[in-house]
């Protein structure tokens, strides 16, 4: 399935299972017209819908994701966690990952991949905002002698 678009992958897997678009829509909870748009390439599914489709097709989420996109996204997550002293491992289920402190792998938390992506994005955005505020304050102190 390498080299196929996400929509082509959805169509191929659906047909492989002998499902109609309507049946896949019912199994996934995504309306049939949206399934059609995904398969035709008119619309790209968001991560939460990709997860619903993967579950309905009984495959790992990674099988539906474009490899370059998921690789970059997963790399961002791993880098974020590593910088904070955490590690990540595949969970028991394909769409879940275990996040734990690097030195204490026994006390991990299992989280859905889509939730982990969103959490990392929020944390990174917040960290960027705080970094910008810190730089502004330091410049105000160092350049202008302002006190906070």
Image (cartoon, rainbow, N blue to C red):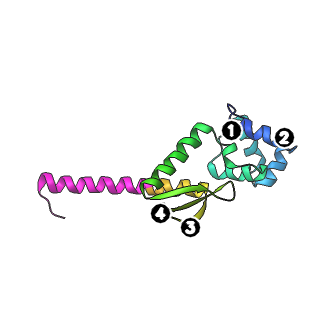
Instruction: Point out the tag, 4 or 1, that comes first from the N-terminus.
Output: 1
Mark 1 and mark 2: span between their CA atoms? 15 Å
Q: Is residue 13 magenta?
A: no
Instruction: Point out the tag, 3 or 1, that comes first from the N-terminus.
Output: 1
Mark 2 and mark 3: span between their CA atoms? 39 Å
Q: Describe residue 74's horizontal placement relative to residue 49 as left or right.
A: left
Percent coordinates x, y for residue 77 in the rendering: 51, 51
Say which element carries label 2: helix
Mark 4 and mark 1: span between their CA atoms? 37 Å
Mark 4 and mark 3: span between their CA atoms? 9 Å
Q: Nearer the viewer, residue 40 or 104?
A: 104
The residue that label 1 is drawn on is 6
Percent coordinates x, y for residue 29 in the rendering: 75, 55
The residue that label 3 is drawn on is 106
Task: Write the start and end of the magenta stretch as one range.
Answer: 124-148
**Local crowd size for mark 1, using a 10 Å CA cut-off: few (<14), some (14–19), many (≥20):** many
**Local crowd size for mark 4, using a 10 Å CA cut-off: few (<14), some (14–19), many (≥20):** few
Mark 2 and mark 4: span between their CA atoms? 44 Å
Marks 2,4: beta carbons within 8 A: no
Marks 1,2: beta carbons within 8 A: no
Say which element carries label 1: helix
Percent coordinates x, y for residue 122 in the rendering: 47, 56
Q: Is residue 17 above or below residue 108?
A: above
Q: Main secondary structure of the magenta part?
A: helix
In the rendered image, the quadrant that contains the N terminus is top right
Instruction: Point out the tag, 2 or 4, that comes first from the N-terminus.
Output: 2
In the rendered image, the quadrant that contains the C terminus is bottom left
Instruction: Point out the tag, 1 or 2, that comes first from the N-terminus.
Output: 1
Mark 3 and mark 1: span between their CA atoms? 36 Å
Q: Is residue 131 magenta?
A: yes
């Amino acid at each position: 399935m390498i080299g196929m678009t996400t929509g082509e992958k959805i169509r191929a897997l659906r047909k492989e299972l002998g499902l109609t678009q309507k049946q896949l829509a019912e199994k996934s909870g995504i309306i049939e017209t949206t399934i059609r748009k995904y398969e035709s390439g008119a619309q790209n599914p968001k991560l939460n819908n990709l997860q619903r489709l993967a579950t309905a097709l009984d495959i790992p989420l990674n099988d539906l994701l474009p490899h370059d996109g998921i690789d970059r996204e997963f790399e961002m997550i791993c880098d974020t966690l590593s910088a904070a002293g955490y590690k990540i491992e595949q969970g028991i289920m394909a769409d879940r990952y275990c996040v734990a402190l690097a030195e204490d792998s026994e006390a991990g938390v299992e989280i859905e991949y889509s939730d982990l992506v969103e959490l990392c994005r929020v944390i990174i955005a917040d960290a960027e905002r705080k970094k910008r505020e810190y730089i502004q304050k330091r410049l105000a102190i160092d350049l202008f002698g302002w006190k906070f």
